[in-house]
Image: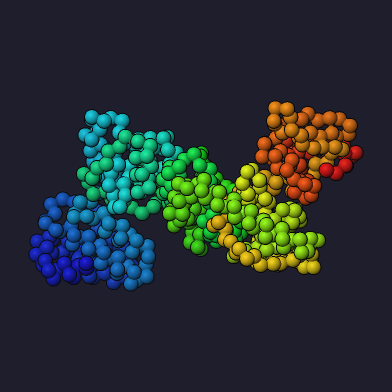
């Protein structure tokens, strides 16, 4: 509503409110940016908070709004922002600051918590809630939610905005809390810094994720949400990637991109989603919100969904093996709905020669099938690097999508490019049922090392081939690692291949 509409409907406001009338008259006389700057300085120093007539503050606020429009017509965004900021704090004539508001809320909190001194007070604001100070710090300690800082006087206060998902989590963890309508209309400016914005966006995403994960916190699930194209910035270099999966584990949440890299949500890498500058954590939170029903179904029906995906892996592998038998000497890439897939030894060979990551498809009963998944442009690269005559492309009759695949990053990625060489080595099963890796270098027996059961079982089930070879290399790399690499570099005689 403009000053003109107020004046036409309530002319007594200007007539009976001399300071506002004078301010309006002076605004009408403004001719240039310098005049407007002087006018804003006058308004900022005016003792307008005293002796306001009824509704006079509304007109005062709209007068500042008119000044903002004047500044925009002059194409002076700085003055327009100054006028806007002044208008927002001129609410019904009470010139309030956040510092004054918080003093009122502190007194309200003292009254609310007399009977429940350990309770956290959440104040309604807009569609959500907020809390500040010691209460915000307490939630940080209990839930590890990010706090932001709002400047108050010469210092700052811890701050948390709580959304609907956050409220679900607080109830889920039985946090002792009191919700209240604030005794003062809180005046919150926009984010004062990029840091405050990022902190708040992280907080919002953490609440969404904790709410979804809380449905079944002991499940460790990798969920495909479809490909989300984003730009990532690492060391000042922008690279186009896509987030393909999110892992909901008991103690953390991670995103997995199309290069196979898994990164915890709370890490500080900055991502830009849809060309808008936003922290990647925000994008991840939005992915979860947009797919909340899918995630909820997967967590509630985890065992049934996993079984269905395992059976599907068997069907896809049977089809792949049948196509492979038609031309066993060529690498096979089978086109599914929106990607190409290589499996087994072919996946190992492609991954080792192109650096594309290996994934494991769960086939049930502890059986994992290594796969490489490629987009069309990546298939072109494989054909160029390995020779088009060495690659065979076929189309699947199943045409599955990523959403129906039981996937996880393969541990065999550790052994793809291992440079360790031994005279003799292998994996054996002990009497206790454990699996150990053993190796001999230059006639010296190295100490046996226990390895994960899934790696040992995988090795024992495989027939000789690329997958069995890289499984052994993975066990060696994980067990002996940098120590043996240093020994191998010092010894020129350790040259027998695995």
Residue 12 lies left or right of residue 219; in this view the side is: left
Residue 106 lies left or right of residue 337; in this view the side is: left
Instruction: Give the residue displayed 74% in from the left and 56% down from the top.
Output: 346
Quarter of the N terminus within the rendering: bottom left
Where does residue 202 sit, x and y in percent of width and height? 45, 48
Instruction: Give the residue displayed 73% in from the left and 43% down from the top.
Output: 461
Residue 263 lies left or right of residue 344; in this view the side is: left
Question: Of all residues shown, which one is farthest toward the top?
Answer: 432
Question: Is 490 above or below relative to 390?
Answer: above
Quarter of the C terminus within the rendering: top right
Question: Is 82 above or below relative to 98?
Answer: below
Q: Nearer the viewer, residue 27 or 324?
A: 324
Question: Is 495 above or below relative to 256?
Answer: above
Residue 15 lies left or right of residue 359; in this view the side is: left
Asked if one can make out residue 324 in the rendered structure from this viewpoint, the answer is: yes
Determine which quarter of the picture holds residue 391.
Answer: bottom right
Q: Nearer the viewer, residue 312 or 285?
A: 312
Instruction: Give the residue displayed 57% in from the left and 52% down from the top.
Output: 309
Q: Nearer the viewer, residue 210 or 270?
A: 210
Where does residue 157 sit, x and y in percent of width and height? 36, 41
Exactly how many numbered labels are in the figure? Answer: 0
Asked if one can make out residue 279 in the rendered structure from this viewpoint, the answer is: no
Where does residue 416 sit, x and y in percent of width and height? 74, 48
Instruction: Give the residue displayed 44% in from the left and 57% down from the top.
Output: 290
């Amino acid at each position: 509503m403009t000053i003109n509409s107020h004046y036409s409907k309530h002319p007594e406001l200007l007539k009976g409110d001399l300071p506002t009338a004078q301010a309006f008259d002076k605004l009408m006389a403004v001719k240039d940016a310098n005049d407007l700057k002087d006018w804003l300085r006058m308004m900022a120093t005016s003792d307008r908070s005293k002796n306001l007539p009824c509704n006079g503050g509304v007109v005062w606020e709209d007068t500042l709004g008119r000044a903002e429009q004047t500044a925009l017509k002059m194409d002076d965004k700085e003055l327009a922002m100054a006028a806007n900021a002044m208008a927002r704090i001129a609410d019904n004539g009470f010139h309030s600051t956040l510092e004054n508001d918080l003093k009122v809320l502190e007194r309200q909190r003292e009254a609310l918590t007399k009977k429940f001194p350990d309770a956290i007070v959440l104040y309604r604001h807009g569609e959500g809630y907020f809390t500040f100070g010691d209460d915000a710090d307490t939630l940080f300690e209990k839930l590890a939610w990010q706090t932001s800082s709002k400047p108050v006087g010469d210092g700052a206060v811890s701050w948390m905005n709580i959304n609907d998902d956050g409220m679900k989590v607080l109830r889920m963890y039985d946090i002792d809390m009191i919700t209240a309508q604030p005794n003062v209309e809180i005046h919150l400016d926009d984010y004062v810094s990029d840091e405050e914005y990022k902190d708040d966006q992280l907080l919002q995403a953490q609440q969404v994720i904790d709410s979804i994960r809380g449905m079944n916190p002991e499940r460790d699930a990798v969920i495909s949400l479809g490909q989300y194209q984003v730009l990532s910035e690492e060391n000042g270099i922008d690279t186009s990637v896509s987030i393909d999966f999110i892992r909901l584990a008991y103690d953390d949440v991670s995103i997995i991109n199309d290069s196979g890299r898994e990164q915890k949500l709370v890490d500080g890498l900055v991502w830009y989603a849809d060309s808008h500058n936003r922290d990647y954590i925000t994008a991840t939170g939005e992915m979860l919100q947009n797919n909340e029903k899918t995630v909820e179904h997967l967590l509630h029906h985890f065992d049934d969904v996993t079984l269905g995906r395992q059976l599907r892996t068997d069907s896809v592998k049977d089809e792949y093996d049948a196509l492979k038998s038609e031309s066993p000497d060529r690498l096979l890439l089978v086109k599914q709905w929106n990607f190409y897939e290589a499996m087994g030894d072919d996946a190992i060979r492609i991954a080792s020669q192109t650096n594309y990551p290996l994934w494991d498809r769960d086939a049930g009963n502890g059986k994992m099938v290594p796969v490489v998944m490629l987009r069309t442009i990546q298939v072109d690269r494989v054909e160029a690097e390995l020779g088009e005559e060495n690659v065979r492309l076929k189309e699947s009759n199943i045409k599955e999508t990523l959403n129906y695949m039981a996937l996880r990053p393969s541990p065999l990625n550790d052994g793809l490019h291992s440079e360790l060489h031994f005279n003799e080595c292998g994996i054996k099963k002990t009497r206790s049922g454990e699996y150990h890796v053993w190796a001999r270098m230059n006639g010296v027996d190295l100490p046996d090392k226990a390895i994960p059961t899934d790696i040992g079982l995988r090795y024992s089930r495989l027939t000789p081939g690329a997958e069995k070879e890289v499984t052994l290399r993975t066990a060696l790399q994980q067990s002996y690692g940098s120590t043996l690499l240093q020994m191998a570099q010092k010894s020129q005689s350790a040259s027998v291949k695995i």
